Amino acid sequence: MSALPVAGDPAAPTAEDRAERQLLDACFLGPYGENDGLLEKLVVEFLRDHVYWRRNFHPEDPPAIPTGAATLPGYRDFEARMRRELHQLSAALKKSVPFHSPRYLGHMVSDLLLPGLVAQILALPYNPNNVSDDAAPVTVDMEVQVGLQLARMLGYPDDPARADCAFGHLTSGGTVANYQALRLALALKAFPVALRAAGVPELPAVAGGARDDHWRGDDWSAFNLGPRAGIELLVRWQAWLATLDRDARRHWRARVQAQRIEQLGLAGFFTRHLQLRVPVVLAPITAHYSWSKGLKLLGLGRDQLQLLPERGMRLDTDALEASLAECARQRQPVLLAVAVLGTTEYGTIDPVDAVVDARERWQAQGLGFGVHVDAAWGGYLATLFRNADGSLRPLQDIRREYRQFPQPEVHAAFAALGRSDSITVDPHKLGYLPYGAGAFVCRDHRAMALLAEDADYVFHTAAEADYLARYRHLGRYIPEGSKAGAAAAAVYVTHKVLPLDHAHFGRLPRQTVLAAEAFHLRAQRFATEVAGLAQALVPFAPDSNLVCLALNPAGNTEVARANAFVRTLHDELRCDPAQPLQLKQFFGSVTTLRPEALGAAETQRLLAAIGLDPATLDRGQVDGDDRLLILRHTLMNPYLVDHENGISYIDLYFEHLTRRVRALLAS
Ligand SMILES: *Cc1c(COP(=O)(O)O)cnc(C)c1O
């Protein structure tokens, strides 16, 4: 097999490349709107279908709007106003960011997958509300199925017949999914303490899990059972309740409810348990700001978010270990340890395997906590690691398809996903679906009972015990109330058309990883091309499909001046509503390298590599000069290399960048 299968050489695609491309040809509307005919046909077809559905509800009901209405003045006046406003909207939207274009290398967004786009347009006029099956008899089940599809991709149990099957639901985005992770972790952590406080007698073991009643010891051990034992305890409690008569059941349920953190609030709960401190969340310094929002929203407060340093651009596991040791020593409870699978800024992959290992070690020593993986960005990369039967692909098999991807550490991180407790993944990022589609998935659905809004978390009837039936009233479990069933339909249909394994959906992220590898190589060539004018460097090998570029004018040693230079370049690469869109050659974005994230040694090495003096950090006039500004490129567009016309937009981008660097620096 040649070294660069797809993205490297647009001029000489192999037969294999062509076959692979053809499968992608019908996936999107396309940069040029190539598939406009297909999209139009589908939309019109299903719109007509919707109209027939309306008419066939009660065909005997006559039309309520008279046939000649369209000629009447009131109607025409309304139509004219509507048209005027719609035309204005349509005109205004021409200033939108051209996410569909292979010249867009900015943020985490690209073209939309046709199956999802059409499913959403098709479902909109039915207006299903996924708050419950009363308002969405069809799409609510699709949402629960999406949870199972994602669970399988991530390595969680996905068979609803299994007692410990995973569960997932959609959210407006990764932010709310991360918040849901915090809510669930807190519910699970505090529940054993509530059982103890309510004086629940010893619970008989249920099949498969006779454990010692660690939770009965003291509040600290009850608060530190950890998610698995917490879920087991919940199941035993539910089984015990079911053996009681109705009055006793009511009595015990009310007693426990009165002790739950959801009932008492943080203030009530922690004043009753003065020995317990408010728990902290440990997350890498690269964590998305939704974590800070989540802690504020939950009332835990930002102070409870402990940010850990990185090493080699990934979560520093020694720092995690030191933090956990300190927590254990101080009797400081930990709510969650967060690993990021595809950081927002750099696309780097944290060692999920090491985080779950650390959790198991510390749990055995009495410090229990949950592990959440924030895979809002990188979640769909898991398709690259999955066979159609759900099994994990060996590292060697995957490696054959790329130059460097995946690093063994990256493979180990994806292989360990199934050992985490919950995961955030955004279909509206690498799932190429319209906004309003994030997802939260937890490993064992039984924990969700603790989030139910009505305290009646015991399911008596066979129908309620049925997995699908239970989650039809989604609104009981999710942070939102009413929400778009059309979004669920879009995700579901897309996953059916492109199953979440390497041979189907995986073709898409494969293109993006190959593009990132080609981009990395091309960046190295760019560095030699501009060597006399500027020093350029890809500061770290990309873990996935984001590639950064550090730049410094030749001879300059000041961080502030390098930042000003990159800022000027970025000003030309960013969205500017005051300018006609067509003036823009390319769209890119920026991020920063912070010494507190990189560590002193790594910062020194990087700055020195492009001729900067680390002592000049924070000497500039601008606020951001305590860090290095770098260009950031998200390589998500599947058409970055146009085999049809032998064009590489990656080449074009670097040619453009070379011209800009010359124009700005050649005197
Ligand atoms: C984008 C992102 C989020 C937030 O997701 P939204 O969908 O924007 O709410 C959270 N975490 C990571 C790692 C992300 O990349």
Image (spheres, grey):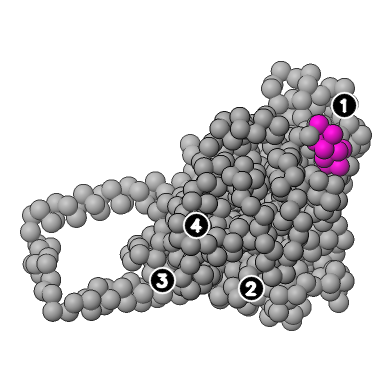
**Mark 2 neighbour density, 10 Å: few (under 14) some (14–19) many (20 or more):** few
Q: Which residue is mark 2?
A: 162
Residue 386 appears in the figure: yes
Q: Is residue 329 magenta?
A: yes
Q: Tag 2: residue type? A: Arg
Q: Which residue is mark 3?
A: 138
Answer with mark 3 or mark 1, whichever residue precedes in sequence: 3
**Mark 1 neighbour density, 10 Å: few (under 14) some (14–19) many (20 or more):** many
**Mark 4 neighbour density, 10 Å: few (under 14) some (14–19) many (20 or more):** some
Viewer-nearest of discs 2 and 1: 2
Answer with mark 2 or mark 1, whichever residue precedes in sequence: 2
Residue interval drawn in magenta: 319-330
Question: As displayed, is residue 48 above or below residue 536?
Answer: below
The secondary structure type at the circle numbered 3 is loop
Q: Tag 1: residue type? A: Pro
Answer with mark 4 or mark 2, whichever residue precedes in sequence: 2
